């Protein structure tokens, strides 16, 4: 069983920018990851199986809805605490962070922000403990980066809504008890619905044969004449901006989370370079290896400062979607490059399950695409600075 020897890199003393509560939350999450995740995660990744026994622990450490008010079962923490928790979880594995991120930002957040008081009381406390698990249905087989063209529809049948359509690439779908589903009403307006497992016509087939996020359960959501009670409509949703607000919260968590994967790869590579001898000296003494390591810690430090500043803006209610996009894009990109360089330092050992490098690399190949692709986030920044939207065809204007 692998021993987790991780040491936190902090080249610019970013810890001095954190409160005691921030560090307490981070350190508690780190200890949980070292104790519960690190010893088993390689085995589950090899089996392509989600470690469901970890759900209870995720609930106990407050990883589900950390910023949700305590009156609804959340921990009532700030956004920097949430980010630090996602950082530590993704250091363990992107799939574990994805599970917590979906539950927090894509299930609990929309119920908290756009749901009725009855919905908040009914669902949020059980979601916070993990007694209920949820998923988020936006992406469709024919519509990924263009969610506004979704084909999933529902009709008002008087006593209920009749829902038809399909969603795919849905994290947590195979075991989720509820799904936050985005669909168009008869007027073509995008609304949010809470669909519960057990509703006739609702199925969640699992997606198999993934090379990435192998410890995350991924599936589809199929709606075949599903009767959804009218009280399950999220009343404050009316338009595409509402699911995108949920994605902003999740993308924020990714900006922190991917730093965790980068830190883990850097720490592993640094330790290996000091211990691995070739030509009678540790490979850390060679210029090319020092170049790799120096560039890694530089990018991690820049990413830490970007995430911390974004967290401060989130706490103040001033962060923009474009700022969140920049952080998600940058930190995912640098994390993937760092992991690739770490693999080079470890040589052949980098592809084995004895080290976390290849698992992180495969995971980040998904993270750089989901919740907004690398290119789409680049164009979001481009739109923000020029005022010209490049990712919509002229015929759609």
Image: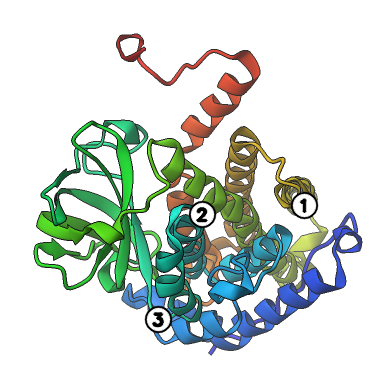
**Number of the label disc, if any, that sits on residue 308:** 1
Up the image or down, 296 lies above or below 44; here it is: above
The residue lying at 56 percent from left, 20 percent from top is 383
Residue farthest to the front, as pictured: 158
Q: Earlier in the sequence, mark 1 or mark 3?
A: 3
Mark 2 Cα shell of 10 Å, populated few (<14), some (14-19), many (≥20):
some
Label 2: which secondary element: helix
Real-space Cα separation, disc 2 to disc 1, in angstroms: 24 Å
**Number of the label disc, if any, that sits on residue 101:** none
Give 391 or 191, whichever is nearer the viewer: 191
**Number of the label disc, if any, that sits on residue 51:** 3
Q: Are marks 3 and 2 in contact (CB under 8 Å)?
A: no
Label 3: which secondary element: loop
Q: Earlier in the sequence, mark 2 or mark 1?
A: 2
**Residue 121 picture location, percent across and down:** 45, 72
- Would you say 60 lies left or right of 205 here? right
- Would you say 68 lies left or right of 22 here? left
Q: Which image quarter holds the C terminus?
A: top left
Q: Are marks 2 and 1 in contact (CB under 8 Å)?
A: no
The residue lying at 51 percent from left, 54 percent from top is 113
Give 361 or 309, whichever is nearer the viewer: 309
Q: Which residue is mark 2?
A: 113
Residue 95 visible at all: yes
């Amino acid at each position: 069983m692998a021993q987790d020897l991780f040491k936190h890199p902090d080249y610019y003393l970013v810890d001095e920018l954190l409160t005691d509560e921030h560090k307490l939350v981070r350190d508690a999450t780190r200890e949980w990851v070292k104790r519960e995740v690190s010893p088993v995660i390689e085995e589950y990744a090899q089996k392509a199986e989600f470690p469901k026994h970890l759900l209870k622990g995720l609930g106990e450490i407050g990883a589900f809805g950390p910023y949700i008010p305590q009156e609804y079962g959340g921990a009532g923490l700030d956004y920097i605490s949430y980010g630090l928790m996602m950082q530590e979880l993704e250091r363990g594995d992107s799939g574990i962070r994805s599970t917590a991120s979906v539950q927090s930002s894509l299930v609990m957040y929309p119920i908290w922000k756009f749901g009725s008081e009855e919905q908040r009381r009914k669902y949020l406390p059980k979601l916070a403990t993990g007694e209920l698990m949820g998923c988020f249905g936006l992406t469709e087989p024919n519509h990924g980066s263009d969610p506004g063209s979704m084909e999933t529809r529902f009709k008002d049948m008087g006593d209920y809504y009749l829902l038809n359509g399909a969603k795919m690439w849905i994290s947590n779908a195979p075991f989720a008890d509820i799904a936050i589903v985005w669909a168009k009403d008869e007027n073509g307006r995008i609304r949010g619905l809470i669909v519960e497992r057990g509703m006739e016509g609702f199925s969640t087939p699992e997606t198999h044969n993934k090379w990435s996020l192998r410890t995350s359960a991924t599936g589809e959501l199929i709606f075949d004449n599903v009767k959804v009670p009218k009280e399950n409509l999220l009343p404050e949703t009316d338009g595409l901006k509402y699911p995108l607000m949920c994605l902003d919260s999740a993308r924020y968590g990714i900006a922190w989370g991917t730093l965790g994967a980068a830190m883990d790869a850097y720490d592993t590579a640094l330790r290996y370079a000091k211990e691995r001898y070739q030509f009678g000296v540790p490979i850390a003494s060679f210029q090319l290896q020092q170049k790799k390591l120096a560039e890694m810690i530089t990018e991690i430090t820049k990413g830490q400062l970007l995430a911390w500043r974004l967290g401060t803006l989130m706490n103040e209610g001033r962060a923009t979607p474009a700022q969140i996009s920049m952080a998600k894009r940058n930190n995912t990109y640098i994390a993937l490059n760092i992991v690739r360089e770490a693999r080079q330092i470890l040589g052949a050992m980098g592809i084995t399950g004895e080290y976390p490098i290849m698992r992180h690399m495969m995971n980040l190949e998904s993270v750089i695409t989901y919740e907004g692709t690398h290119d789409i986030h680049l164009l979001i920044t481009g739109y923000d600075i020029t005022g010209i939207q490049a990712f919509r065809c002229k015929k759609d204007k």
